[in-house]
């Protein structure tokens, strides 16, 4: 098994060197090493079906399929769902059909030989402000080449390459949240559109041709929203990382990819997507109507936050997060077989000096649905801006029915 270098298994950093995982860098994700470690502990032979209720970039699902385990997932962000399924199902098809790989190579050659045409003041439905004009002209012409490909699988795989370089060729950086890059940040990266797209396509071609890459099963979307899955005593193992309760806007962080791949028309479409997932960020609160129930185990923290929170939506966010996660945990308790394993990567948080022990609260809720925690491991610790010590940890549960 691959080794965890420098204790980074709980981050995406190690995936940047791994075949297929490296196609799209997902800052909020964890490493394939973490998943392999958990599967090895449980025993590969004892798992037939794995489910990730928050699929993200598909790390758990890809590792599962590589080990002959049938993967299922949920994911409300359409661009992440596309990336997840294409990385697994697209590669599996490309391994079986040489025409797909040849079509990707043809796209590569067309991009390599393209002569760009530039248009001053290029418009992109309001997204032009996130790109330098000439780079925007270039990426859109490259997208025209990809979209003209008749092979739908090759087209989708090549679009993942565009998603993989979207931030790099823009005026933005993604560090915690998506924001405009400072001059010194932009100077550290290659923003030559043709070069970075070709480099990414080269990685993709190399990984598809890699004889060590073997994907046994397609990944299947169980339901966009994990609160609506209908599995009953069918899943052997869940390995996941729910959205952290830290105010991160997971939709806004991928708005460039959402636009470039055609999942949104303009920024006015983003609030619709905010309202689909569980409440983990302030913008998700804005998308909800009605009163949010406050669970008894969460009420003390909400009561502390209400008079001091710097944004009145924060107490609602905290209440809504655990109410939504309660529904997810209830669904998982039904989906898992008896003795099924539930592995969760999670971190705690603080707002206005109020510490929210997310792991403890989720454990309390999980116990109410028959989950028993049999192990816990701290992956790393950190300090928040106000000095509060926070941690990232793995919680390991088993359910007995």
Image: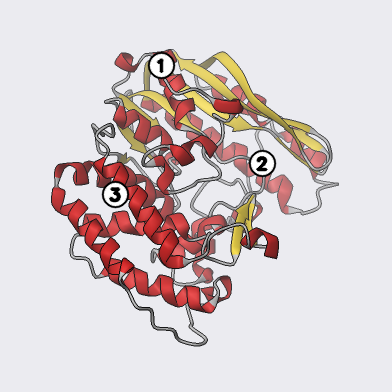
Q: Is residue 182 visible?
A: no
- Looking at this view, is 219 or 108 the one in front? 108
Q: Secondary structure at mark 2?
A: helix
**Eyeballing the image, is 398 above or below 328?**
above
Residue 40: image tag: 1
| Discs 1/2, front | 1
Q: CA distance from mark 1 to mark 2?
A: 36 Å
Quarter of image, res 177: bottom right
Does label 1 or label 2 sit earlier along the sequence? Answer: 1
Instruction: Indicate the colouring scheme.
Output: secondary structure
Category of crowding for the residue at label 1, using alpha-carbon neighbours closer than 10 angstroms: few (below 14), some (14–19), many (at least 20): few
- Looking at this view, is 79 or 236 the one in front? 79
Q: Secondary structure at mark 3?
A: helix
- Looking at this view, is 302 or 260 the one in front? 260
Residue bearing the label numbered 2: 319
Q: Horizontal and vertical percent for residue 310? A: 81, 52
Residues under numbered marks 1 and 2 in contact, where contact means CB atoms less than 8 Å apart? no
Q: Secondary structure at mark 1?
A: helix
**Eyeballing the image, is 398 above or below 264?**
above
> Looking at the rendering, in which quadrant would you find the N terminus?
top left
> Looking at the rendering, in which quadrant would you find the C terminus?
top left
Residue 205: image tag: 3
Q: Horizontal and vertical percent for residue 399? A: 45, 16
């Amino acid at each position: 098994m691959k080794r965890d270098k420098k204790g980074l298994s709980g981050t995406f950093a190690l995936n940047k060197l791994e075949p297929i995982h490296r196609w799209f860098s997902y800052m909020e994700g964890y490493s394939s090493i973490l998943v392999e470690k958990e599967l090895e502990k449980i025993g590969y032979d004892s798992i037939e079906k794995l489910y990730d209720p928050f699929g993200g970039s598909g790390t758990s699902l890809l590792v599962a399929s590589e080990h002959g385990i049938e993967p299922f997932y949920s994911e409300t962000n359409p661009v992440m769902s596309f990336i997840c399924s294409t990385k697994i199902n697209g590669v599996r098809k490309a391994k079986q059909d040489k025409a797909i790989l040849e079509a990707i190579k043809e796209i590569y050659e067309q991009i390599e030989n393209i002569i760009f045409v530039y248009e001053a003041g290029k418009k992109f439905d309001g997204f032009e402000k996130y790109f330098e004009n000439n780079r925007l002209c270039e990426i859109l012409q490259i997208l025209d080449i990809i979209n003209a490909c008749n092979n739908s699988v090759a087209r989708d795989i090549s679009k993942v390459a565009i998603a993989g370089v979207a931030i790099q060729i823009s005026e933005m950086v993604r560090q915690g949240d998506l924001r405009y890059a400072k001059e010194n940040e932009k100077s550290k990266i290659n923003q030559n559109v043709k070069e970075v797209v070709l480099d990414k396509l080269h990685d993709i071609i190399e990984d598809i041709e890699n004889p060590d890459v073997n994907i046994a099963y397609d990944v299947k979307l169980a339901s966009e929203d994990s609160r609506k899955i209908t599995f009953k005593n069918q899943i052997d193992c869940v390995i996941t990382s729910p959205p952290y309760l830290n105010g991160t806007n997971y939709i806004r962080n991928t708005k460039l990819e959402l636009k470039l791949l055609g999942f949104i028309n303009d920024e006015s479409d983003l609030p619709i997507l905010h309202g689909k997932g569980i409440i983990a960020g302030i913008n998700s609160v804005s998308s909800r109507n009605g009163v949010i129930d406050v669970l008894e185990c969460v009420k003390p923290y909400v009561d502390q936050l209400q008079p001091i929170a710097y944004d009145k939506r924060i107490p609602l966010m905290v209440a809504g997060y655990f109410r939504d996660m309660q529904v997810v945990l209830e669904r998982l308790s039904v989906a898992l077989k008896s003795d099924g394993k539930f592995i969760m990567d999670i971190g705690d948080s603080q707002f206005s000096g109020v510490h929210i022990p997310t792991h403890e609260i989720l454990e309390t809720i999980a116990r109410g649905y028959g989950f028993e925690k049999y192990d816990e491991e701290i992956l790393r610790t950190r300090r928040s801006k106000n000095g509060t010590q926070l941690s990232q940890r793995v919680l390991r549960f088993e359910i007995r029915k």
